[in-house]
Amino acid sequence: MTKAAVFGATGYGGVELVRLLLDHPDVELTWLGGHSTVGENIAEFYQHLNGAIDMKVREIDVPAAAEVADIMFFALPHAVGAELVGQALELGKKVIDFSADCRLKSVATYEQYYEIHPRPDLLEQAVYGLPELHRDEIVATQLTAVPGCYPTSAILGLAPAVAAGLIEPNVIVDSKSGVSGAGRKLSLTTHYTECNESVAAYKIAQHRHSPEIVQELSGLGAEMTVTFTPHLIPMNRGILSTSYGTLTREVSVAEAVALYRDFYAGEPFVRVLDEGVLPATKRVSGTNFCDMGLAVDANAGRLIAVSAIDNLIKGLSGAAVQCMNLMIGAEETTGLTRYAYWP
């Protein structure tokens, strides 16, 4: 039985991770850490967990938690947990980090989009936690960095085409996310009366997730340029990304579907849909699946890939559990085999 500590347990990503781990047959939760919620019983703070767990949130104390945990999850904001991650690694613990601190390989790129990196040495040993591209590395690593939710949808949507040289190395990604992607913190942007009945683009050509998309797609072929535009849409959860690439040769939708299915053959959580079928966020809500539909605009010479994920599961906590399974030698799908609820 693997014993797990979760730091940042009462954020949306943290509590979703707690819920998933409670269903995991090979994991025991031994430490929940927080800041403003210390002393709170998590089942009282989040009453949907009532009857499933009886555990109070404690301080974020890595050495103390290390005495009762084999693996540590850090669901903390960027730059906040980097030193703590370093402590956990020095204590010999396996670590899965939710922040952006370990995702990018370039310190300069990180500091361009975030701030001065507190522990640049971590970047050398971290593995980008997208099993569909880095499974063997995740199995062997001590430190996995969970991808951003937007990049997960975009990278999975474009990776087969980039790897096959089917599109030019200059792509456009248009993404729409539910409000939970902004986290539990209060802000005017996510206030009900501000975002309800409205869709808005934000941080055009400067979003912090852009370099992740560039980094991972560039690793599959030529150096990529990406125009990424995120939108906030008034729903609780889910991301729909529509990605556009200029074709290097003529291709039919049937050929594109076959190429994508070959690339993702054996992948348990990527579902390439039949020709003419496009994904919707509701069909993956509450699941670790990425659904993908393809179209070809013959007049414009473009491939269009549409991908849908649950931003809190495949885009965050489910991805963390998938990576954890690989790191601890469990079956990769353990604890993640649920399907979407409907309607």
Image (cartoon, helix red, strand yellow):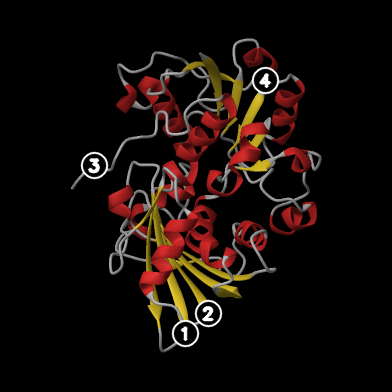
Q: Is residue 312 visible?
A: no
Q: Please, what secondary structure does the residue beneath circle 3 have? A: loop
Residue bearing mark 4:
62
> Residue at point 70% right, 30% down?
85
Crowding around mark 1 (Cα neighbors within 10 Å: few <14, some 14 to 19, many 20+) is some
Marks 1 & 2, CB-CB < 8 Å contact: yes
Q: In this rendered view, identify the residue nearer to me: 330 or 204.
A: 330
Name the residue: 45% across, 46% down.
Answer: 267
CB contact under 8 Å: marks 3 and 4: no
First in residue order: circle 2 vs circle 4: 4
**Mark toward the viewer: 4 or 1:** 1
Amino acid type of the residue tagged 1 in the rendering: Gly
> In the picture shown, does residue 263 fall above or below 287?
below
> In terms of secondary structure, where does tag 1 sit?
loop
The residue mark sitting in front, 3 or 2, is 2
Residue 281 position in % (x across, y down): 33, 54
- Sequence order check, earlier mark of 4 and 1: 4
Residue behind mark 2: 246
Residue 137 lies in quadrant: top right
Residue designated by label 1: 301
- The residue where tag 3 is placed is 341
Which residue is found at the position 39% from the left and 48% from the top? 310
